[in-house]
Image: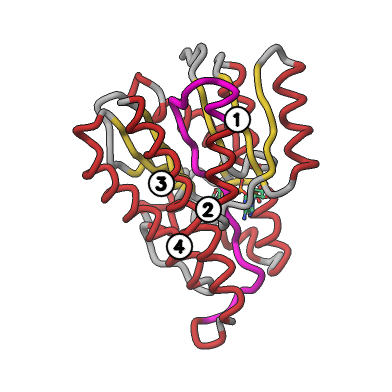
Amino acid sequence: MNLKDKIVVITGAASGIGAATARHMGVLGAKIAASDINLRRLENVVTEINDAGGTAFAHRVDVSDFNQVDAFFKAAVEAYGSIDIVVSNAGIGGKEQHKTAEHTHEDWHNVIAVNQTGVFYTMQAALKQMMVQGQGSIVNVASLAGLKASGYNLSYSASKFAVVGMTKSAALEYGKDNIRINAVCPGYTRTPLLEKLLGFRPEMEETLKRLIPMDRFGEADEIAEAIAWLASDQAKFITGQTLVLDGGTSLL
Ligand SMILES: NC(=O)c1ccc[n+]([C@@H]2O[C@H](COP(=O)([O-])OP(=O)(O)OC[C@H]3O[C@@H](n4cnc5c(N)ncnc54)[C@H](O)[C@@H]3O)[C@@H](O)[C@H]2O)c1
């Protein structure tokens, strides 16, 4: 697959799935505008891409602040002239694991601000630019937790169901404008976010693996390859869809 000279904007690109997507798309020839709240780690990823012969720059962005998101998109257009692909990936898992009655309001607001409002802000900035250009492709990183029930993390579940809903509703609005909007729904994928979840409850590793018919966690690279394909012209008649990458967990 080829993304030669496609302009790609990615949020949450310093780690895990976002970093793997930035690296993979960089190798495929795309020019990458990479953002994250963690600038130090992001700069390492951008250096790797540039050292491998790609083109990328780093911009510190907290996706829960629209002014920062808007400034980032303006910087991307200033650097590269336009935006072809946006990957809205930044997300957090929440600090706690409680049943709903005990879920703290602080954790609720933090998770919704990043996972839900952050995706809305990112899509909004993307769509304003894509409407000017008359084309574009957005991939939101949702989760299997946006399609199926999952306990002990209501804010995460709510935010990911919202990402799926926003993906479908916005795709309906912008189909005629030559702008596609899709989501990937990873199952359990080995990244720092999953390691943190296992840190809360290490005994969960074996329990989780029993929920995966393929008997292993996904890898960030595997999600990155699907994101690149879904964003690319090879998927040009696909919009409003959720692509599940879960080793079969959703079959159970
Ligand atoms: N790992 C999994 O099992 C899994 C499964 C399903 C969905 N996802 C989703 O995939 C996406 C990426 O997760 P990951 O597993 O790679 O996690 P990760 O923790 O490795 O990476 C997330 C990145 O987002 C950044 N980030 C956090 N808050 C931010 C903010 N306010 N603004 C900008 N950047 C911010 C972090 O600094 C980090 O670099 C998330 O949306 C997550 O919900 C992950």
Q: Amino acid at mark 1?
A: Ala
Decide: marks 3, 1 in contact (CB < 8 A)? no
Judge depth for marks 4 and 1 and give the one in front.
Answer: 1
Name which of mark 2 and mark 1 comes first in the sequence. Answer: 1
Which tag, 2 or 3, sits closer to the chain's start?
2
Q: Which residue is mark 1?
A: 33
Circle 4 is placed at which residue position? 159
Query: Three-letter amino acid code at disc 3?
Result: Gln
- Give the residues drawn in magenta, as a range: 76-99
Mark 2 or mark 1, whichever is nearer to me = 2
User: Which residue is label 2 attached to?
Assistant: 66
Q: 210 and 190: which one is in front?
A: 190
The reply to whether the C-beta atoms of the residues labelled 2 and 3 are less than 8 Å apart is: yes
Rendered-image quadrant of the C terminus: bottom left
Q: Residues within 10 Å of mark 1 (few under 14, many from 20)?
A: many
SS class, disc 3: helix
Disc 2 vs disc 4: which is toward the camera? 2
